[in-house]
Image (tube, rainbow, N blue to C red):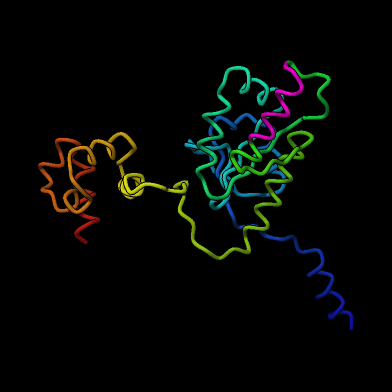
Amino acid sequence: MKKIEDIFSEEKTKKEVIKTKIIVDNRERNSLIIPFLIENKIKFELKNLEIGDYLINDIIIERKTFSDFQSSIIDKRFQNQFENLRKTKRKVLLVEGFESYKNSRINENAIRGALLSVALSYNIPIIFTKDEEDSAKFLILITKREKKNKKNFSLRIKKELKSLEEQKKFILEGFPGIGPAKANELLKNYQNLISIFTEKKKNLEKILDDKTAEKLKEIVEK
């Protein structure tokens, strides 16, 4: 009887192991969120993210303190940032430290209007958090929910690609060493993807460096 009781007590005290990794943008390396992730034994990796501050599978999380949210309205970064975020499939905005409009630097209606734009015009869900610890707890909760999802996700941020040109560019950017600029140049010089994939390596080297051209040909041909 004692052995059976011991087995069940061990199961109750066993901590949940979370294997899903959080990709953290390098700009967040000094955030107090990092210590909370370490404390909770959450796997994370620092990288340069094109969009957002955190990436969990294909969920992009943009984190803004209330002060930064106001600044983005004042210096007009707001529209460009959230337009890029809107194009992604799964996204969340964390607004951290918002308690009231009393300490706001701009008109209350400007803040209300910006929040409405995020939710209605850009279709981005908004989560209000108290502080860094509260934000970290939301990230950990998202990670726990995502561990049940068995799909394989690309680390490339997936956007809703509307035009054929966007789709072709997205495919090219998936090759090692080919970023947005090189993808645009290739599409400018070649009629379609087949023309690029069947082109001789020495001709591709007019646009790509030797190693990138060689890798592209290797992937396409093998």
Give the percent coordinates (x, y) of residue 23.
Answer: 55, 44
Q: Nearer the viewer, residue 158 or 211?
A: 158
Left or right of 194? Residue 105 is right
The quadrant holding residue 45 is: top right
Q: Which residue is at 82% across, 29% downward?
A: 99
Residue 191 visible to an observer of this rendering: yes
The mark tally for this picture is 0
* Image quadrant occupied by the N terminus: bottom right
* Residue at x 84% of width, y 70% of height: 9
Which residue lies at the image location 22% right of the left edge and 40% below the top edge?
Answer: 186
Q: Is residue 175 visible?
A: no
Residue at the extreme bottom: 1
> Taking 173 as reference, is 78 left or right?
right
In magenta segment, residue 31:
no
* Quarter location, residue 65: top right
Seen in the picture, residue 74 relative to 133 is either above or below; the reply is above
Provide residue 13's location: percent of width, then percent of height.
81, 63
Quadrant holding the C terminus = bottom left
Residue 85 at x, y = what percent?
54, 39
- Identified at 66% across, 29% down, the residue is 114
200 or 116: nearer the eye?
116
User: Residue 163 placed where, x, y %?
Assistant: 37, 46
Residue situated in front as seen by the camera: 163 or 206: 163
Q: Is residue 115 on the magenta stretch?
A: yes
Seen in the picture, residue 152 relative to 85 is either above or below; the reply is: below
Instruction: Tell which of 26 and 179 is nearer to you.
Output: 179
Task: Give the magenta range.
Answer: 106-117
> Horizontally, is 98 left or right of 196 in the view?
right
- Most common SS among magenta residues: helix
